[in-house]
Amino acid sequence: MKKRILLDFGVPFRFTKTGIYNYNMALKKYLANYYNEFDIFYLDDVYPFSNVYGFIGKLIYVLWINFFLPFYVKKYQIDLVHFTNYLTPFTYLPTKIVVTIQDLRSMSNDVRERKLSSLYRFYRRIIVLNSLIKAYKVIAISQYTKTDLLKCFGNKYIDKIEVIHMGVNPINKINNYNVEKSYPKLNNLRDSGYIIMPGPLTFRKNHIDAVEMFCKHKRFFLNRNMRLVIIGDGPMRELLHSRIKQDSLEENILMTGYISEDELDYLYRYASIGLFLSSYEGFGLPLLEMLLRDIPVIASDTSSIKEASGNIAYYVKVHDIEGIFNYIQYILDVKNKVEVSARKRLGVEFALQHTWQVTVSKTANLYKSCIGNRE
C-alpha cells in the first residue's frame, strides 16, 4: 500500500506569484512524478473553507488545522503532513510532520516592511518555535535560514533541520510577437539595452536605490538609450512612481506591475544587467532566474544572497548607490567583456544545478526517510 502524504500550502492565505507561491506550485507539479510511490493529498481538496480569505478565512483555517485536521489525518491514515508555510498546529497531530521555513524576517528588528510591534514578533517567534518542536524534519530553504534558526532557537534542533534550496523553472520557448502585442510597453526594448529588477515592491527590496542611482546618473543612461525596467507591484509603487516623475523619466524607467510568465521570460532574455538589491532574503529566486538566463547580476552583499547566487554575482553593500553604478559601468565596458562572459557562464552552470526538479527530488527523498522511520 502506498504511503499517504498530505500537503498544506497555508490556505486560505493569498500569495503573489513569488517565493512561497512558486515553491508550492513546483511541489504540486513535480510531485506528480512520485504518484507511483505516494498517495498525495492537498489540504484545499478536503478543507471546506479554502476559498474564504481575509481575517475570517485565516481564523477558520487556524481552527481547522488545530481541531479538525487531527481527525482527518487519523481517519484517512495519513503517514506524513508537510506544512510549507512555517505554521503547524498547536494541538497534537497523530502523524509525522515536515515543515518548510523560508526565513525569519518577521522576527527581525532590522526588517521594516511594515511596522511590527514587539508583541507581533513574539507571536511569530512562538509559531516558529512550535513548528520546530512539533516537526520530525524542518526544511530550511538555505543554509542562511538554518543558521538563523539555530541562532534564534538553539543547536538542539540541528538534527531536525535539512537544507533544501529552492529552484528555477526551465527556460520557456516564447513567441516574441505575441508578447509584444499583449504588452505594448515591451515594444523595441530588445533593440536597446536595459537593466532589469524583478521582485515585489516592498521596502526591503530597495527598488528606490536603483531609481535614485538611475536619476543621479541619468545622463549616462540617456546617452546610451538604456532603460531601467522594474517588475512587480506592492506598497512602494506610488513612492517609486513619484520619484520617477520628479525627474521626468517615465519613458526611461518602466514599471510593469505583475506580468505573465511569458512576458517575464521575454524581459529576462534581452536584459543587459540584472539588479537584486534586497536587504534580507531567505533565498532569492530572481537571482537564480537571472543567472540561468545569462544575465550578469549586481546584488546586495547580505543574508543568503551570496548562497543563492553561488558567489558569482557582483556584490555591493546595501544602499551603496555609487557601487551599483560602478558595476554597471564595469559590465558595459567592452574591455571587461571576457571576464563578464566567463562569469555569466558560471552563473548558468550554477543555476542549472538548482532546478525545481532537484528541489522536489530531495523533498521526496526526505519524505521517504521520514516515513521509513515511522514510529
Image (cartoon, rainbow, N blue to C red):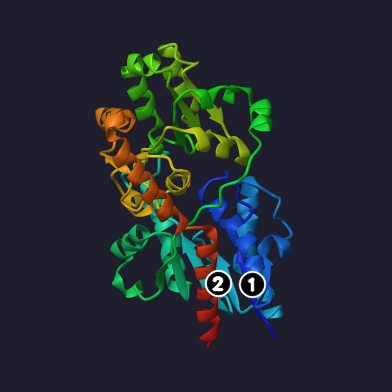
Tags 1 and 2 in contact by the CB under 8 Å rule? yes
Q: Residues within 10 Å of mark 1 (few under 14, many from 20)?
A: few
Q: Is residue 217 above or below residue 155?
A: above
**Which residue is labeled 1 in the image?**
34
Q: Nearer the viewer, residue 89 or 163?
A: 163
Disc 1 to disc 2, C-alpha distance = 8 Å
Can you give x and y, in whole percent of width and height, for residue 246 in the image? Answer: 41, 12
Residue lying farthest bottom?
375
Closer to the camera, 115 or 281?
281
Q: Position of residue 373 (x, y in %)?
A: 51, 86
What residue appears at the point 58 percent right and 79 percent down from the top-left corner?
A: 95
Q: Earlier in the sequence, mark 1 or mark 2?
A: 1
| Residue 364: mark in rendering | 2
Q: Tell me residue 77's x, y (percent).
A: 67, 81
Q: Residues within 10 Å of mark 2 (few under 14, many from 20)?
A: some
- Identified by mark 2, the residue type is Ala
Q: Amino acid at mark 1?
A: Tyr
Q: Which x, y percent locates residue 97?
A: 53, 73
Q: Give the quadrant of the N terminus.
A: bottom right
Residue at the location (56% across, 68% down)? 82
Can residue 40 be seen here? yes
Give the total number of marks visible in the rendering.
Answer: 2
Q: Residue drawn at (50%, 66%), measured in percent from left and top? A: 99
Of residues 202 and 270, which is closer to you in this image? 270
Decide which of 346, 247 is in the foreground and name it: 346
To which quarter of the image does residue 228 belong? top left
The residue tagged with tag 1: helix, strand or loop?
A: helix
Residue 78 to residue 31: above or below: below
